[in-house]
Image (cartoon, helix red, strand yellow):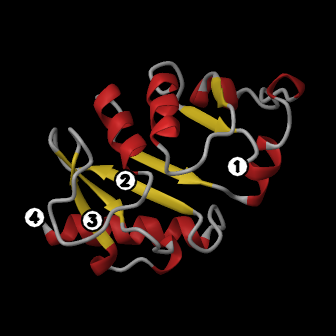
Amino acid sequence: MDNQRILDFVSAANDIGNYGLVRGSSGNLSYRLDDETMLISASRTWLAELGPDDVAICKISDGTAINAKRPSVETSFHAGALRQRDAINVVLHFQSTAATAIACLKPDTYDFNLIPEIPYYIGSIGFIPYIRPGSAELAEAVNDKITQHDLLILANHG
């Protein structure tokens, strides 16, 4: 394992936390290393404070950890997104204050096309009804929707 890739992952995670995209431990990040493995933030870690010892290495095929770290409870949908879409190399699950506020709106009451960059760079946004975080049902819903969307919003969550 190239230690520099872990350090780069940690740096990106710290930036995400420092930019305010996550609060406390409310978020997780994964990164495709190759066709078979990924890095993911370990369970109960804070991205703003993530260190090299807080990174799990997992199989993309089933989310199983291959190092001694316990991965995020959301590993199933991270691995699923990487399995579903070869072009995806990074998955960020976050609940910024703004994302949570938007997630509390009814999907048909909000027009995301405020600026032309949103439909151009993001495309259509998928909505998932609230499903308990960390559940197999949420992973299944994410894996189903990620085939058609690059950005998903979980109702009442983020």
Above/below status of 91 relative to 122: below
Instruction: Point out the tag, 1 or 2, that comes first from the N-terminus.
Output: 2
Instruction: Point out the tag, 1 or 4, that comes first from the N-terminus.
Output: 4
- Residue under label 3: 56
Of 85 and 104, nearer the camera is 104
Callouts 3 and 1 close, C-beta under 8 Å: no
Callouts 3 and 4 close, C-beta under 8 Å: no
The percent coordinates of residue 21 (x first, y second) are 63, 61
At label 1, which amino acid type do we have?
His
At label 2, which amino acid type do we have?
Ser
The answer to which quarter of the image holds residue 13 is bottom left
The answer to which quarter of the image holds residue 119 is top right
Instruction: Point out the tag, 2 or 4, that comes first from the N-terminus.
Output: 4
Extreme residue in the left direction:
1
Of 96 and 72, nearer the camera is 72
- Left or right: where does residue 144 sit relative to residue 114? left
User: For the residue labelled by badge 4, is the local secondary structure a helix, a strand or a loop?
Assistant: loop
- Residue under label 4: 1
Callouts 1 and 2 close, C-beta under 8 Å: no
Q: Which mark is residue 157?
A: 1
> Around disc 4, counting alpha carbons within 10 Å, would you say few (fewer than 14), some (14 to 19), or many (20 or more)?
few
